[in-house]
Image: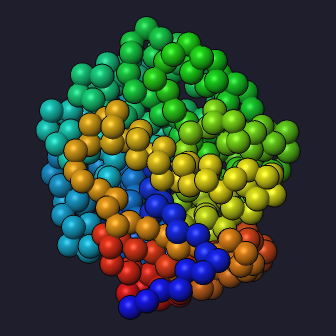
Amino acid sequence: REIDGQGKVLMPGFIDMHCHLRDPGLTYKEDMETGMKAALKGGFTTLVAMANTKPIMDNAEALKANMDKADALGLCDLVQVCALTKDFSEDDLVDFESTREYTNVYSNDGHNVDNEGTMKKGLAASTEYNFILATHCEPETETVERDIALLRETPGHLHVCHISKKDTLDAIKAAKAEGLDITCEVTPHHLYASAMEYKVHPPFRSYPDRRALIEGARDGSIDICGTDHAPHSDEDKLKGAPGINNFETAFAMYYTVFEGAGIPVERLSQMLSEAPAERMGIKAGLVKERYAGDLVLVDLDAEERVDPKTFISKSHNTPFGRELLKGKVLMTFKGGEIAYDNGSLV
Ligand code: DOR
Ligand code: ZN
Ligand code: ZN
């Protein structure tokens, strides 16, 4: 089949370093299949799924079960995050020996690790077992600063999830200047909007915070564009569940911001694909051969209004329901095959 790419842009498949697939246990919000299909529609071919499932992903059997499920589906590649501590407790670390076989990212997303001793042991383990420790310590800049201080004493591979504040970014810039092994990620919603009431964790910030994040994306101090895709049912949102359904709008939200700020799309591509690949592959030693033939064809001139009714995701929670966005994913290729084509999964 011949594909007309005239005037379009072909990019490497996007690698989402931070999403929530809700499988197992919370599959009324999303399951692996609906999540991965929504992701492919959004141009994401590899997903790093956080561990706050039910039960929590804190042992090798659970990780293996999800990796097998992903293999059977054959949609996206999955990096299933393992919790740092059993059941997200404050002090009971998971068994790294057995879990490391299935993952190279550990994180207690949704829960901050308050216990410094635990965080120190986690950092030491990230060096010993060669994995990325992703910390959910934003929204508090003080906690990011604490983690940086711990990293200074105990070398490790630290990744700071969903940064939302200028102060946090400044702390991370300083840590990078010291030569510490630290990376950070931003979400589409914190780059796109400020001062909104919609419940998300971390919350929407001020306009100056948002501007600082955009400059961080431009100058390279922010490494990675994630999604923090956090699907929730209408009922759970009414009860106050934090989170935004992002897979199907992330690229257009990011591109709209980048284009508006005059940041080249090549930089966005780095942040969506190259940087997360490098962070999880080269430094952490993930050896599986990935990404070959994972591609996204985008139309950068297309403008479209978001319509959550058209989401493939099981949930529709977004405050950007009528937003006019620029940039559209036309096709997604997985392993050289067409996986998503202009509105339908193949
Ligand atoms: O808003 C959020 N919701 N932020 C997170 O990091 C977790 C997520 C969730 O699991 O719903
Ligand atoms: Zn989080
Ligand atoms: Zn999250």
Asked where in the image residue 221 lies, by quadrant, the reply is: top right
Residue 179 in view:
yes
Asked where in the image residue 189 lies, by quadrant, the reply is: bottom right
| x then y, percent, for residue 276 | 45, 46
132 or 2: which is nearer to us?
2
Please identify the quadrant where the N terminus is shown.
bottom left
Apparent side of residue 122 relative to residue 38 in the rendered image (left or right): left
Residue 260 higher or lower than 158, as above or below: below
Q: Residue furthest bottom?
A: 1
Residue 155 higher or lower than 282, as above or below: above
| x then y, percent, for residue 26 | 39, 65
Q: Residue furthest top?
A: 153
By what rule are the colours in the image chosen?
rainbow
Residue 201 higher or lower than 313, as above or below: above
179 or 297: which is nearer to us?
297
Asked where in the image residue 54 lies, by quadrant, the reply is: bottom left
Q: Residue at x 49, y 70 (%)?
A: 296
Residue 285 higher or lower than 43, as above or below: above
Q: Residue at x 62, y 69 (%)?
A: 249
Q: Residue at x 73, y 75 (%)?
A: 301
178 or 113: which is nearer to us?
178
Apparent side of residue 84 relative to residue 110 in the rendered image (left or right): left
Residue 112 in view:
no
Please identify the quadrant where the C terminus is shown.
bottom left
